[in-house]
Structure formats: C-alpha cells, structure tokens
Image (spheres, rainbow, N blue to C red):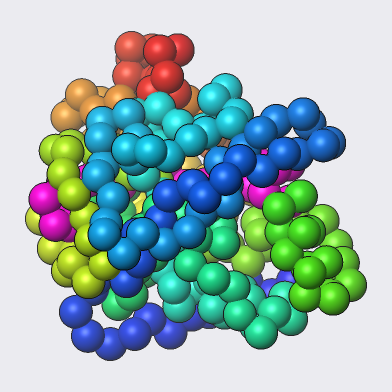
Amino acid sequence: MNVEPLSVTITQGPARVTSTCTVESLFHVEETGIRSGIGKIPRKEGIKLLTHGVLGDVQGDTEHHGGLFKAVYAFARETREEIARREGFSSLPDGAFGENLVTEGIDTDEVVIGSRWRIGGAELEASVPRQPCKTFAVWMGRFAERAGLEPRGPWGRRFNAYGKSGAYFRVVHEGVVRPGDEIEVLSVPEHGVSIGEIFRGLSSEIDPQSAKALLSWARQTETPVYTSMARGCLAALESAGTAFEFPASLITDGRGN
C-alpha cells in the first residue's frame, strides 16, 4: 500500500460551518452485528449540540463512540474532497464520514487540542482525533461498491496514512448550530499540539516533547485527557526515558470510565 500524506489547501475567507448533519437511518454492519449511526445527512434547519452529543444523533458502538470527548465530530470539506479525489470518487456527500459539522475555511486537523470555538449558540473545545474503526471501513467499502470502484487496500490503514482525521469536540455550552454560522476561535492553548499531530503520532509514535507539552498543560489546567491520547503520550515519554507524573484522575474516555 502506497499512500502519500494529504496536503490540503484550505479555502480563503471566513471560517464557517457549511453543513450540519445527523443520522438518517441506522446502518447494519453484518461483520460486527452493530447497527451504526455513521450514515448522516445534512439538516438545513441546523442541529442542537448537547453535552453528551447531538440531539437526535445515534452511536451504535457506545464502547468506542460518543461520550463527553466525542460529542461532536467536525471535518473540513476541503480535506474530504481531496480524499475523495485520491480514492477515485467523483464526490463524497456532506456527512459521508459520519461528521456532524462540515467546515470550510479552517483546518479541523490543525486545531490545537483544548482550543475553544464559538459556533452559533454553542461553544466547543477540541478534544481528540478520530480513529478509524471497522464500521467506517465497511461503510466506505459500500460507497466504493456503489461508485463501481475497485478496493484500494484496507480503508483504516489508508485513512491513517492520509494523516487527516477530523476533530472531535466536547460541548462547553449547549446550543444550536446552523449552516452558514461562522466559526469564532475564542482561545488557543500555548502548548501548540494539534489534533492532527496526535492522530499521526498514534499511528507511529508521538513526539515526546509534544507529549510533555500537552500533558503539562492538562495537569496545570486540570483538563481531563482522553484515555488513548493520554496513554499514547505517556508511552512516548517512557520510551524517551523521560519521567513524568500525570494524575490518573485526569485520564478518562468521557463515558464514565
């Protein structure tokens, strides 16, 4: 499998949400028996973002999806269109990756973890990258079948190799977001570690300096860190021979664990 990492040109102009999406119908994954909510369609009236997720949305695999850290999923339209081109699709519709918010004019992968955005009536905090799962692979396989495309290799590995995951957000203040709402960046933490950097690091190894910067910020601000991200950072520090104490109370998956 030979996949070059994506280089995406983000649209110039105000950062905004171009589409808001929720589940259309449940997708039955025969390989796992899960009925998934990955199949989403645009809602012109907008969507309401709640602390535990989007009103009316569904997660079939609640062991790995949903919860406080993964309440809302955003993906840049520019990135999705470039992936579609690379994969041979004429296009991929809004919601094709299971995203709730389709953005334009801002790179959802290079948003710094802990950054706060105001969109419409909601305030969000960038929390964790998306990791491709079996359901995502089966879903994209169906897209390819309908488009008459030959398989190009395991989708999860290809998605990882592209290096662009989109970003999950937790909801700081609940509210309604509608298509066309501008994205106002309220704050950006000084640690500088982006969603995309952690996503790419989880596939290989997270940079120890970035791991220390992120965990130091979380410890100082008492900000909980998603389990896989915290463990990946601690493993990177251990491999580098760097001793670092991080409170277990700040490691959680946001689903009561």
The x and y percentages for residue 37 are: 56, 41
Residue at the image position 73 percent from the left and 64 percent from the top: 143
Between 155 and 230, the one nearer to me in the picture = 155
Question: In the image, is 71 to the left or to the right of 144?
Answer: left
The x and y percentages for residue 255 are: 42, 19
Residue at the image position 77 percent from the left and 29 percent from the top: 33
Residue at the image position 28 percent from the left and 50 percent from the top: 47
User: In the rendered view, would you say 112 is above or below 206?
Assistant: below
Between 186 and 14, the one nearer to me in the picture = 14
Examine the image and state in which quarter residue 253 appears.
Answer: top left
Tell me, yes or no, whether the highlighted magenta stretch contains residue 128: yes
Residue at the image position 22 percent from the left and 72 percent from the top: 180
Examine the image and state in which quarter residue 212 appears.
Answer: top left
The x and y percentages for residue 1 are: 85, 66
Examine the image and state in which quarter residue 192 appears.
Answer: bottom left
User: In the rendered view, would you say 7 is above or below 159?
Assistant: below
User: In the rendered view, would you say 220 is above or below 91?
Assistant: above
Image quarter of the C terminus: top left
The x and y percentages for residue 188 are: 18, 54
Q: Is residue 66 visible?
A: yes
Between 257 and 216, the one nearer to me in the picture = 257
Tell me, yes or no, whether the highlighted magenta stretch contains residue 213: no
Question: In the image, is 68 to the left or to the right of 221?
Answer: right
* Outermost right residue: 150
Question: In the image, is 190 to the left or to the right of 145?
Answer: left
Q: Is residue 1 visible?
A: no
Chain part drawn in magenta: 116-137
User: In the rendered view, would you say 192 is above or below 89?
Assistant: above
